[in-house]
Image: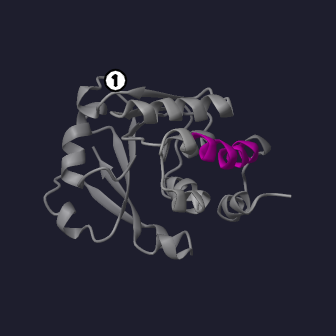
Amino acid sequence: MNSPGLDLLLHYFPGLTGQQRAHFERLGLLYPEWNERVNLISRKDMENLYERHILHSLGIAKVVRFEPGTRIVDVGTGGGFPLVPLAILFPECTFHGIDGIGKKIVAVKGVVEGLGLTNCTAEQIRSTEHKQRYDVIVSRAVTTLPEFIRDTKHLVTKGQGKMYYLKGGELADEILPVRNAVKVHELKEFFTEEFFATKKVVEVRM
């Protein structure tokens, strides 16, 4: 019998493999353990782990299907969102999470190791100091869109990269000064839970 959290994921992603189901089920055990050691998310939010963190992360997968071999960086990964859920969903892609807070990276590495994921790594470094190049940038909002683009644009090849930024609320004022091509995807079109009513995936051509 599946956990309620896994059933929620299967409702929106019915094609999960047995391995992916096992990984997502295990997340429900690993995150509370790590949250006791490192405060990754609030205790109240831990009760809604699958909806507000795992499913929210997978919202990116509702607007893009990463091709095998795609190199993806999660900037400001925090507790590993959207990094870890996406790495589970796209096992043929490589994922690297970066964050300036060391204890969070320790926790992310612990979760990745606990799952046995081989396509996912994490590193304590700020985006402005990171020199690697990737195909795609993902993130859950860490700052305003113009500021985030400015601090991460060097991580992809100009004109060839994409960004998928999870953000909530009214974005018109943030998008106005952005010169890049921007497309906003409303997550309420994919998920019916009230939490997603104002949540969006902002797609930016870099």
For label 1, the SS is loop
Secondary structure mostly seen in the magenta stretch: helix
User: In this orientation, which residue lies closer to the viewer: 147 or 12?
Assistant: 147
In-image side of 87 versus 60 (left or right): right
User: In this orientation, which residue lies closer to the viewer: 31 or 68?
Assistant: 31
In-image side of 193 versus 21 (left or right): left
Return the x and y of residue 93 as percentages of the image width and height: 55, 33
Residue lying farthest top? 131
Inspect this view and state whether residue 72 appears.
no
User: In this orientation, which residue lies closer to the viewer: 172 or 65?
Assistant: 172
User: Which residues lie in the magenta part?
Assistant: 20-34
Q: Quadrant of the N terminus?
A: bottom right
The residue where tag 1 is placed is 132
Return the x and y of residue 60 as percentages of the image width and height: 48, 54
Is 7 a magenta residue? no
Inspect this view and state whether residue 162 appears.
yes
At horizontal 39% and vertical 47% (from top left) the residue drawn is 139
At horizontal 39% and vertical 30% (from top left) the residue drawn is 102
When the figure is inspected, residue 127 is found, relative to residue 56, above or below; the finding is above
Is 22 a magenta residue? yes
Q: Amino acid at mark 1?
A: Gln
When the figure is inspected, residue 193 is found, relative to residue 109, above or below; the finding is below
At horizontal 23% and vertical 45% (from top left) the residue drawn is 149
In-image side of 126 versus 109 (left or right): left
